[in-house]
Image (cartoon, rainbow, N blue to C red):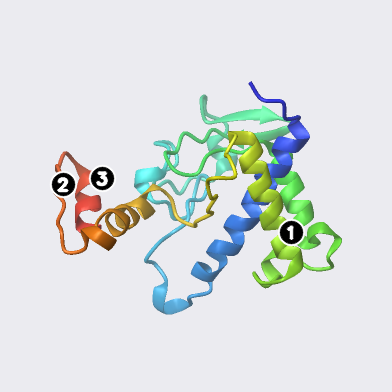
Amino acid sequence: SSNFSIHERQSAVVAVLRIMFVATRSTFALGPAHAGRRCCAMVAGGKVHAANAPSHVAGTSTPFSELKKKPFTHTQHLGRDRAINLAAGAAALPLEVLEKAAREFVDTDNSGMSVAEMGYRTKPFHAIMERAEDGVRRLLNVPDTHEVHFFNGGATLQFSAIPLNLLGGINKGKTANYLMSGHWSEKARNEA
């Protein structure tokens, strides 16, 4: 069990969200040449990556305002209708965390700027990184003998990270065997 208050947990999640945004903003800044290579899921409408979308959202053009009239599509929290998110990828976050992140997004830590405007080498951004790392260390009991790294991307990032780490250094030039059992193992093999 954890000794963290809800406020401490929310602060840790907000800090991680800030870092994830900064890490991914360069992806969005790539411009039209990269358009369509990857799309973001949007609740009930818009473009959705079918592998990560709940069945009532994938490929639908039905607005959420109409979907929420159907059973098992939403919940109510703090007076707001919230889509039920059963996606394998991005998970639903507590509304309080999202609202705090939205408030602090415009003026992060009273710095007069958004985290999206901060350079990653600036003191305000390093303060965010240090708080995030400290929060992760305390929440997961990560000892000082281990490093904490924040990466953009999801599990598919490991498709290249694992072979790069395991087949480099003293193992350079060696090969790996992959057991093909379906869609995800094929993606891992192709990336390696």
Q: Residues within 10 Å of mark 1 (few under 14, many from 20)?
A: few
In the displayed structure, 47 sits above or below 70; it is below
Is residue 2 something that shows in the picture?
A: yes
Q: Residues within 10 Å of mark 3 (few under 14, many from 20)?
A: few
Closer-to-camera residue (43/39): 39
Closer-to-camera residue (119/95): 119
Mark 2 to mark 3: distance in Å? 11 Å
The residue under the point 72% across, 71% down is: 122
x and y percentages locating residue 46 in the rendered image: 48, 54
x and y percentages locating residue 101 in the rendered image: 72, 50
Say whether residue 47 is left or right of residue 182: right
Q: Can you tell which quarter of the image residue 108 is in?
A: bottom right
Closer-to-camera residue (175/50): 175
Q: Looking at the figure, which quarter contains the N terminus? A: top right
The residue under the point 52% across, 53% down is: 149
Q: Residues within 10 Å of mark 2 (few under 14, many from 20)?
A: few
Which marked residue is nearer to the observer: mark 3 or mark 1? 1
Is residue 114 something that shows in the picture?
A: no
Which residue type carries mark 1?
Ala
The residue under the point 71% across, 39% down is: 10
* Mark closest to the chain's N terminus, 2 or 3: 2
Mark 2 to mark 1: distance in Å? 42 Å
Which residue position holds label 1? 127
